[in-house]
Amino acid sequence: MKNKSYVGIIIRACLIISCILIGLCLIGNDMYALIKWAGALFILGFSVLPLVLILFKDGGRYSYIFSKVIGLCTLSYIVWLLSSFKLVVFDRWSIITVIIIATVISWSLFYYVVRKKSDKSALVCSLSVTEIIRSILSVELAFILAFLLITLLMGCKIPATETERLMDYAFMKSIYKCDYFPPLDSFAAGENINYYYFGHYMMTYLSKLAGVNVSIGYTLALNMIFALSLIMVFCLCNIILEDMGIGLRGRLSGGVISSMAVCIAGNGHYFVFYKLVPMLQGMLGIETDKKYWFADSTRYIGYTPVVENDRTISEFPSYSFLVGDLHAHVIDIIVVITILSLLYAYLIITKDKRLDDEKLTFHGIAHEILNPYLIIISFLISISSMTNYWDFIIYFTILSIAIFASTVYRCKKVPRIIWLAITKVIVSYLIINAVNVLFMTSFDKMFDGIGIVDHHTMLHQLIIMWGIQIATVIIYMIILLNKDDLMGIRTGDNKFFLNIIMPDLFCLCLSLCAIGLVFIPECVYVRDIYYGSYPRANTMFKLTYQAFILFGILFGIIMVRVSVRLRGVLKDVRLQRIKTSLILIFMLFLTTLFYFVTASRMWFGEPDTLSYKGIESDSSILENMGDEANVVKWIDENITKDEVILTADGLSYTDYCVIPALTGHPTVIGWQTHEWLWHNSYDYVKERQQDVSSLYSGLSQTDRLNLIDKYDISYIYVGAKEREKYSDIQIDMILECGDLVYTQNNGYYFLVKVAE
């Protein structure tokens, strides 16, 4: 057996090396950056691996992948905290020093505890060292392969400014250049970033650790999130299905289905409007000029048919990955999957520990309230709150529901012990706020209360968007809660949950939460700057995005869980109907998987036209700038970190404000709608826009100099966009403000250093 284990290790190591060599052939020098990135992530995971082996002791072979995210969140937070207090500079040496200290402490404590404790089974997973190494190599092989494939695809097209890439890039560039936190806002001189930037910080942290610049780090971060999400969902589903007693083949099938449902699948809109509607129109002889575009699946409710003042967003992960926006909700995918995995591990590890209030001593109560799982989960939810605040609301709610469900599950006298669950929830909330308090004190929230929905989604739209997922979980819930135990899957003696085993209870909780996330935007919404025209757009966007992820995780588990039980069923009519329904649902689900293929062809081009162009995320923008791109290079090489460079302001999703975004140097005001949202005030934006107009086209040199002092402007840039926007631009008066330090194309592009 030992020889077989060693052979397995050698084979996996050889396959990893083969992937690297193939990558060098396919993407050339970009593979070196990918290797450095993967290596940096491995180091972070290795530093906290002892903690993960303890937390996931019952799912050891699948748990290694979560160490990467736990290590990234934990160690990056330490550096961020120290830098926020100005105790360390945010640079590579600080990062490496913290990692070394954390690794030494982590492994030393692990060695000490394992060696000293007599009951080692309570501390570590049951796998041997060779099995752990083999599982680590298996995960690394899958991760590198997925990482390479998505990088190969994403490198075929680097979008310019038609999405929010420029904004996300500006965040990372500003963070990369800062010494201490919070970082400066490149789109608002004199202000710090008033956004949930911690996720962008983590990706920048990885860029510094890996030794790659932001241009490459941006693309690698997005590709890493895709690869990690794919494998993490697979591993989580394997852990759950194994606890349900499912065999290896079923576990692998369920993991693959759920991974595809989360990361690859589209929604039901794709099949209906890309295939079904055109087919029916052809049969009926209806001619139309409207053709399906893959982004239509994220803009359906309020658009088809048009409903004024109720345009909504129904985005999902595969769309996010393809268009390449490294946005807050995308970055947080890996964090929320880790939260769910730890939450499941907590429920499993505590399921057999009965809660009888007469037996709870002070020590027992303290251990329940300050459970290590709850502390770490609370910490990760706090990271989510600094990355995407909506996810804090969602996953704190899920945590609270799970705590109450676990408490009821574990005790016989619920009314006398429910206070313990309430206390746990309160303590978790306090931990979350203790971790993020420094971030939140320098942050102005971007919402203005709760509103009641005036418009509701049409029934057929809900069925198209969510029919597959909701039908699946409703069938599952009916089976679980049926007193006749149709599935024969219940054990135990808990009367409150009809003897449902813990893995099913966990899935039941997620099912209820996912359905709730779909229907909450039908009742209320959070007010922000869009509430006048598209009031529930942002609320529906953020809530249903997480609903899609939860439904995706559940889909593979439910399909395998139910199909294993129904295998060979012939006589029971009810079970036959369930079997037929699930087969139909699964066939419909398969159609949604083609969304990724169709969308890729629409976005990247037909396969025979594709060619790998590289992963520098600013390449298309610089190419579109033509000769003007030289000024970006000059600024990077000649101007220090924090100096303000005046450029023209512009609308979001345009070519305006490219220079402050690509260089990290602040301008007076950047993309209009985004700054309006971040400051929750159009007056703030309007005032600065008027000042910029006066700086470029005003007739008073005195006013111009006063505005230069007001915003501490060090440089004034004049280029194509400035000349385009300000037709009456005062070139001579701008030149009088200081010294001409850069000029190109006979003075069409120039940069003036303001006189001190």
Image (cartoon, helix red, strand yellow):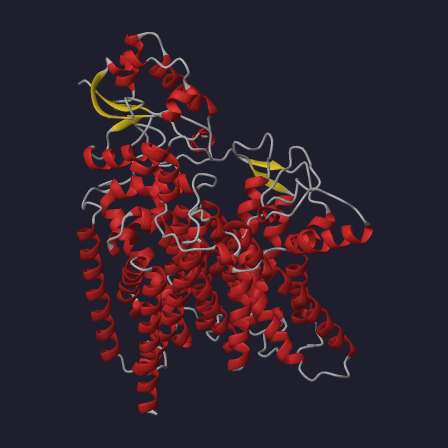
Q: Residue at x 41, y 73 (%)?
A: 62
Residue 151 in the image: x percent, y percent? 40, 58
- Rendered position, 110 above or below 201: below
Residue 216 in the image: x percent, y percent? 32, 50
Classify residue 26 as left or right of residue 106: right
Residue 399 in the image: x percent, y percent? 48, 58
Does the rendering let one see residue 149? yes
Of the 4 image quadrants, the one containing the N terminus is bottom left
Q: Nearer the viewer, residue 90 or 638?
A: 638
Q: Nearer the viewer, residue 365 or 498?
A: 498
Q: Residue at x 32, y 33 (%)?
A: 627
Q: Residue at x 44, y 46 (%)?
A: 327
- Rendered position, 81 above or below 640: below
Which picture quadrant has residue 577?
bottom right
Which picture quadrant has residue 678?
top left
Classify residue 91 as left or right of residue 21: left
Q: Residue at x 20, y 51 (%)?
A: 92
Of the 4 image quadrants, the one containing the C terminus is top left
- Rendered position, 38 above or below 194: below
Which picture quadrant has residue 654?
top left
Does the rendering let one see residue 358? no
Q: Nearer the viewer, residue 260 or 398?
A: 260
Residue 132 in the image: x percent, y percent? 33, 78
